Each structure stands twice: as structure tokens, then as C-alpha cells.
Amino acid sequence: MAQVKTVEITVKLRVAVGVESSAYRPNHIDMHLDATQSEALKALHVASVNEPQKLAAGRWVQTPPDVVRHLLEQVAAAMSPAKT
């Protein structure tokens, strides 16, 4: 079994603020990952299974798409007005 460790990562992202709520927002993505990206996703997925985390909706992170959802929830939380 893989060892799970916590790594604190600081990421600087460029985000658009003030986007109209009526603007088109994709709710589905279909993408291919390169080897480095897929290894990172697998590492996050294994860690989420070994040390369970919950999505905002209350479901457990169980699949690679759940990992992406969890990351996006963290980005959204960091962007919320309460954090500025």
C-alpha cells in the first residue's frame, strides 16, 4: 500500500473576477492527461481513498473525477469574497 503524506502546496492562479452569473459555465469536461498529469491525479486519488475526504455535497471523494471536483471546490472557496 502506498504511503500517504500531507504536502502543503502554494499555487498562484490567474482567475477572472466579476464574471456574470448568466455567462456560460461548462459543467462537463473530457480530457486526456499526459504522464505527469496522470501520475499526479493518481497520487491524489490514492491519498483520498486512504484518507477519505468529503466533497461539499457530502459525498466521499472516491474517483479521479471526484478528485478534480474537490480541487475545484478548494479553488472556489479561496476565490470567495469572504477570503479577500
Image (tube, rainbow, N blue to C red):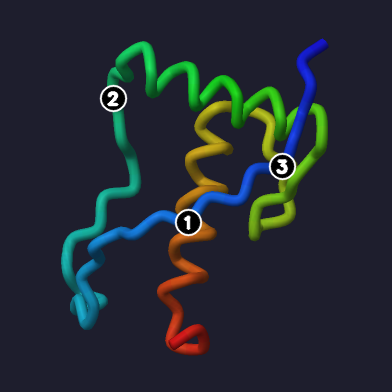
Reading the image, the residue beneath label 3 is 6
In which image quadrant can residue 14 be found?
bottom left
**Amino acid type for the residue under numbered disc 2:** Met
**Amino acid type for the residue under numbered disc 1:** Thr
Q: Secondary structure at mark 3?
A: loop
In which image quadrant can residue 2 be found?
top right
In which image quadrant can residue 60 be found?
top right
**Amino acid type for the residue under numbered disc 3:** Thr
Reading the image, the residue beneath label 2 is 31
Q: Nearer the viewer, residue 84 or 64?
A: 84
Q: Nearer the viewer, residue 24 or 36?
A: 36
Q: Residue 33, how many percent across, how many down? A: 32, 19
Q: Quadrant of the C terminus?
A: bottom left
Q: Is residue 3 left or right of residue 55?
A: right
Q: Determine contact: label 1, label 2, CB under 8 Å.
A: no
CA gap between label 3 and label 1 equals 13 Å
Q: Is residue 63 left or right of residue 82?
A: right
Q: Residue 77, how many percent across, how many down? A: 51, 70
Q: What is the crowding at mark 1: few (fewer than 14 residues within 10 Å), some, or many (at least 20)?
A: few
Q: Quadrant of the N terminus?
A: top right
Q: Residue 23, how many percent across, how many down? A: 17, 69
Q: Secondary structure at mark 1?
A: loop
